[in-house]
Image: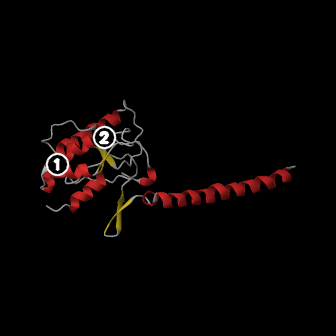
Amino acid sequence: MFKEQIKPAILSFLILTIITGVLYPLVVTGIAKVFFPKQANGSLIYRNQKPIGSSLIGQPFDNPKYFWGRPSATSPVAFNASASSGSNLGPLNSALAETITNRIKLYKAADPNNTAPVPVDLVTSSASGLDPHISLAAAFYQISRVARHRNLSQDTVKKIVLQHTKGRLMAIIGEPVVNVLEVNLELDEYKK
């Protein structure tokens, strides 16, 4: 009886492995490459024919002439795409409160004349730890610092931010967001 059951079990295992492990991924990838070629290839951003990042994965920026993105809780390094995760610290966790306080101090030290409250998305990490976007409020909060360090007018920096602002999904879901990498690259290429 055991021999009668083992042969169909192994055959079923092999057939399902080929279907779900080889054929299905190939078909789905092929469809994605035809209908969504940029996204299927990682939404990479190129400069001088070299990939410098993805519009879907955040990157760390700490130079004051750049917009800073949302903090990343991935490890062992920030924005580690192979280790997408949040901090898993709850709202009553003292480590989270201390981390947020330190991030607020960092923003206040980087722009001491800015008396506005630091937007929440600049001091809390996203669920994935890879968020490439910040809110419009977070971008506007940083305009004065970025403009000062680049010797640009705040209006010029604001115009560049607005050019890289993506509206609500289907005009109703979520809030407008700014892609940090894209706006920083635009600032690097800006000619006065």
Q: What SS does tag 2 mark?
A: helix
Mark-to-mark CA distance, 2 and 1: 17 Å
Depth order, front residue of 175/14:
175
The percent coordinates of residue 161 (x first, y second) are: 23, 50
Q: Is residue 4 visible?
A: yes
Which residue does the numbered mark 1 point to in the structure image? 145
- Residue type indicated by callout 2: Asp
Depth order, front residue of 19/171:
171
- Residue type indicated by callout 1: Arg
The percent coordinates of residue 18 (x first, y second) are: 67, 59
- The residue lying at 12 percent from left, 55 percent from top is 151
Depth order, front residue of 161/171:
171
State the image quarter where residue 95 is shown. Answer: top left
Depth order, front residue of 60/182:
182
Q: Who comes first in sequence, dot 2 or dot 1?
A: 2
Using residue 123 as the reference point, say whether residue 83 is left or right of it.
right
The percent coordinates of residue 16 (x first, y second) are: 69, 54
Q: Are marks 2 and 1 in contact (CB under 8 Å)?
A: no
Q: Residues within 10 Å of mark 2 (few under 14, many from 20)?
A: some
Q: What SS does tag 1 mark?
A: helix
Using residue 4 as the reference point, say whether residue 66 is left or right of it.
left
State the image quarter where residue 88 is shown. Answer: top left
Q: Is residue 49 above or below residue 87?
A: below
Q: Is residue 191 above or below residue 89?
A: below
The percent coordinates of residue 51 (x first, y second) are: 36, 65
Which residue does the numbered mark 2 point to in the structure image? 121
> Where's the C terminus, which quadrant?
bottom left
- The residue lying at 47 percent from left, 58 percent from top is 40
- The mark found on residue 86 in the picture is none
Judged from this view, the residue extending furthest toward the bottom is 49
Q: Is residue 67 visible?
A: no
